[in-house]
Amino acid sequence: METKQILETIRMVEEENLDIRTITMGISLLDCIDASTEKTC
């Protein structure tokens, strides 16, 4: 990561109340995606 990206993330957490937990959860759920709804569920 670049310093600019880190500072932007800190700014978003402080000023825009960014909840990092939702980003982490979204990334982890990407591994569960499948073309078939039967396999996904």
Image: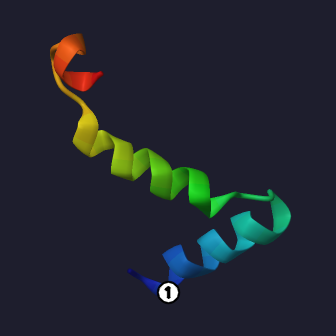
Q: Secondary structure at mark 1?
A: helix
8 in relation to 2, above or below? above
Q: Give me the residue at 24% from left, 13% from top.
A: 37
Q: How many marks?
A: 1
| Category of crowding for the residue at label 1, using alpha-carbon neighbours closer than 10 angstroms: few (below 14), some (14–19), many (at least 20) | few
Residue pointed to by mark 1: 3
| Residue depicted at 80% across the width and 59% down the height | 17
Residue 38 rendering spot, x and y as whole percentages: 20, 13
Position of the C terminus, as image quadrant, is top left
Residue at (25, 24) in percent of width and height: 40
**Outermost residue, right direction?**
15
Image location (x, y in percent) of residue 39: 17, 21
Q: Position of residue 4 (x, y in %)?
A: 53, 79
- Viewer-nearest residue: 6 or 30: 30
Side of 4 relative to 7 (left or right): left
The correct choice, above or below, for 3 with respect to 11 in the image is below
Please determine whether, in this image, residue 34 is positioned above or below residue 15.
above
Image: 28 above or below 32: below
Give how far across and how far down residue 1 sits, in percent.
38, 80
The amino acid type of the residue labelled 1 equals Thr
Residue 35 lies left or right of residue 17; in this view the side is: left
User: Looking at this view, is 4 or 10 the one in front?
Assistant: 10
Residue that appears at 30% across and 41% down: 30
Figure coloring: rainbow
Q: Which residue is farthest top?
A: 37
Q: Is residue 38 left or right of residue 13?
A: left
